[in-house]
């Protein structure tokens, strides 16, 4: 297991999170996912057993055609942007994260005229955060493939005794939360590139009461901004090569074929020897009870 200082570098979790967010906003989400996958596997093979079940290849975002149809309603004719966000809520049947879609006009920012680089710069500088917007439809989009990790993270965050700050379990939760967020952003960007929208609106991708502060943007008919030189000051916080990716065929199209969630949870819950009684009983805390 690598030391946390080797993973987070001298700036700690905050600097690490900023670096991941910058990569995603600048169109380099794949590099962000590569770095996260390497770091998660390095500090906890058990946690990677969970995160590795949701590579981008097995994730699905359903309902894109319904979203396209809804945006054709006269009420939405003057929209400047839509925001697609992951929420902490769980679908009662599938356990997948609920997806919220809101419509936005130019009330907070000139989204209809700003370039992609201008919107990204405003987000990075903290000068722009989309408001609450207006809800578009109900449960138009649904995710497949994120239920296991999403449930574990939200269960841990809802606990009365969360992991101690700076503990191995706390650091694992931090990395898992970023992995979930980056995969969601990649999923929405992939569907936008694959399916597109019939309506020329900016697409904002984020989260609502869920995960780290991460916003990315897609401006139709305009290329992503050029990659940015982040001036990595230390090898410990530079992007790292990815481990061998999880084979899609191993889990099937939905990420669950031949895969037992119950068995994995049992494995994780008994990852420590029986004679060890951890102070915390959450799944992430048990990963590191011996360390």
Image (cartoon, grey):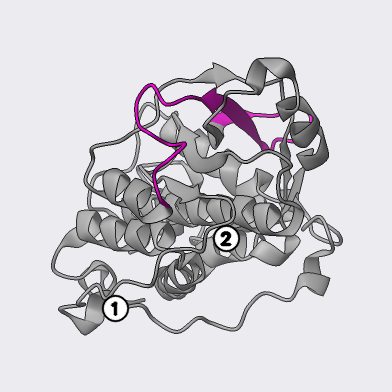
The residue nearer to you, when weighing 147 against 20, is 20
Q: Label 2 belongs to which residue? A: 51
Question: What segment is highlighted magenta in the picture?
Answer: 88-115
Q: Above or below — where is 76 with respect to 227?
A: above
- Give left or right: position of 33 versus 26: right
Magenta stretch prevailing secondary structure: loop
In the rendered image, residue 250, in percent from the top left (x then y), is placed at 80, 72
Q: Above or below — where is 170 with respect to 78?
A: below
| Other-residue count near label 1 (Cα within 10 Å), few / some / many at <14 / 14–19 / ≥20 | some
* Residue 56 lies in the magenta-colored region: no
The residue nearer to you, when weighing 124 against 69, is 69
Q: Quadrant of residue 258?
A: bottom right
Query: Mark 2 to mark 1: distance in Å?
Result: 21 Å
Mark 2 or 1, nearer chain start? 2
* Residue 101 lies in the magenta-colored region: yes
The residue nearer to you, when weighing 57 against 2, is 57
* Residue 283 in view in this figure: yes
Q: Above or below — where is 235 with respect to 123?
A: below
Q: Quadrant of residue 49?
A: bottom right
In the rendered image, residue 213, in percent from the top left (x then y), is placed at 35, 42
Query: Residue 136: which numbered mark, if any?
Result: none
- Give left or right: position of 230 versus 38: left
| Other-residue count near label 2 (Cα within 10 Å), few / some / many at <14 / 14–19 / ≥20 | many
Residue furthest front as drawn: 113
Query: Residue 238: which numbered mark, if any?
Result: 1
- The local secondary structure at tag 2 comes to helix
């Amino acid at each position: 297991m690598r030391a946390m200082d080797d993973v987070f570098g001298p700036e700690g979790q905050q600097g690490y999170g900023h670096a991941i967010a910058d990569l995603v906003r600048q169109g380099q989400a794949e590099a962000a996912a590569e770095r996260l996958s390497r770091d998660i596997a390095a500090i906890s093979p058990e946690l990677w057993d969970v995160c590795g079940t949701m590579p981008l290849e097995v994730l699905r975002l359903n309902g894109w055609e319904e979203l396209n149809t809804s945006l054709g309603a006269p009420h939405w004719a003057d929209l400047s942007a839509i925001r697609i966000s992951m929420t902490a809520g769980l679908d009662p049947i599938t356990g997948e994260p609920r997806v919220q879609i809101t419509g936005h006009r130019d009330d907070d920012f000139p989204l209809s005229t700003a370039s992609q680089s201008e919107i990204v710069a405003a987000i990075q500088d903290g000068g722009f955060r989309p408001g609450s917007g207006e809800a578009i439809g109900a449960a138009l989009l649904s995710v497949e493939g994120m239920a296991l990790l999403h449930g574990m993270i939200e269960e841990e965050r809802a606990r009365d005794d969360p992991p101690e700050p700076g503990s191995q379990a706390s650091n694992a939760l931090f990395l898992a939360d970023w992995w979930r967020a980056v995969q969601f952003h990649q999923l929405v960007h992939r569907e936008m590139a694959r399916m597109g929208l019939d309506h020329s609106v900016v697409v904002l991708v984020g989260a609502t009461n869920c995960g780290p502060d991460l916003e990315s943007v897609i401006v139709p008919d305009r290329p992503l901004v050029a990659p940015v030189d982040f001036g990595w000051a230390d090898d410990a916080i530079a992007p790292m090569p990815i481990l061998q990716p999880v084979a899609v065929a191993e889990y099937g199209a939905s990420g669950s074929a031949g895969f037992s969630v119950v068995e994995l949870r049992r494995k994780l819950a008994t990852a420590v020897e029986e004679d060890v009684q951890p102070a915390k009983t959450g799944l992430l805390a048990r990963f590191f009870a011996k360390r």
